[in-house]
Amino acid sequence: MPKVVVAETRRQDVAQAVLRIVGRDGLESASLRNVAQEAGLAIGSVRHYFASQSELMIFTMEELRQRIDRRIRRHAEQLLGPDAGIDRRTRTEELLAEFLPLDETRREEAVLWTAFITAACTRPEFRPCARRMHDEMRELIARVLYEAQKSGGIPANLDIELETLRLAALLDGLAMGGVPYPGGVAPGAARDILRRHLQSLTVPAQRS
């Protein structure tokens, strides 16, 4: 196996160790020493792959962003592809639900992402990645709404820019409500709220 592939694989393994620590003990616990111990490496080995803790944390945040993005893009391909057909409304809901902590995997990712974007308030090095995720989410929502408008699923006079911001704010709020503590917004309630919002955007059925 080429050395560059081995190095990238090892960097990803170290990033996974960071995510385990952050999920379990919080971002402040992800010191190089703790990360090395979690990864089963000498601290010198971690320093061999990352010049600084800041570089390690930025790499880890980007790995998390890409993991979330890959899952969401799979749904987007189904919805925005030529075969969406009559399942468009269901597929829209499924796509947007990927932004919500509706199961253990998505809740874990939401907890981790929340830790990083909270830290970005005081750690400027985290902001470019946080901004990228923010922008990509809104671009995807806007495209979903535009395609729904093109297909006649939502009114032609709907303000897509405004509705994109409104839907993004709803998803952000539901995600935050389902993460910080037990007893927040339950997964079933979050999905019901999302479904009700999407229904409010649709064109009313014509009466015969």
Image: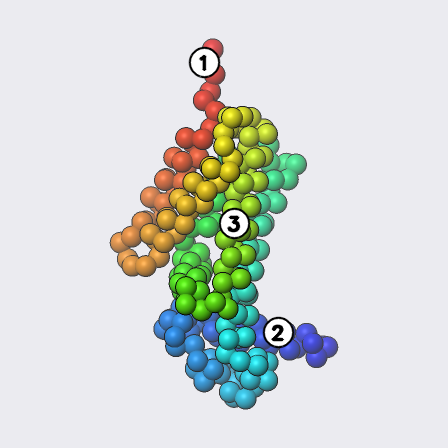
Q: Residue furthest right?
A: 2
Q: Earlier in the sequence, mark 1 or mark 3?
A: 3
Horizontal side of 5 relative to 92 (left or right) equals: right
Residue 43 pos. (x, y %): 51, 87
Up/down of 141 relative to 20, above or below: above
Residue linked to disc 3:
137
Residue type of the residue flagged with mark 1: Arg
Tag 3 and tag 2, C-beta contact below 8 Å: no
Q: Earlier in the sequence, mark 3 or mark 2?
A: 2
Up/down of 182 relative to 95, above or below: below
Residue type of the residue flagged with mark 2: Thr
Residue type of the residue flagged with mark 3: Met
**SS at mark 2?**
helix
Cα–Cα gap, marks 1 and 3: 36 Å
Residue 199 pos. (x, y %): 42, 31
Residue found 57% across the figure and 79% down from its top: 50
Up/down of 155 relative to 189, above or below: above
Tag 2 and tag 1, C-beta contact below 8 Å: no
Residue 194 pos. (x, y %): 40, 40
Residue found 60% across the figure and 42% down from its top: 78
Tag 1 and tag 3, C-beta contact below 8 Å: no
Residue found 52% across the figure and 88% down from its top: 42
| Label at residue 207 | 1
Q: Which quadrant, please, contains the N terminus?
A: bottom right
Q: How many marks?
A: 3
Residue found 41% across the figure and 50% down from its top: 172
Assess disc 3: are there few (<14), some (14-19) or many (≥20) residues with their C-alpha within 10 Å of its C-alpha.
some
Residue linked to disc 2:
9
Q: Earlier in the sequence, mark 2 or mark 1?
A: 2
Toward the viewer: 130 or 20?
130
Q: Residue furthest top?
A: 208
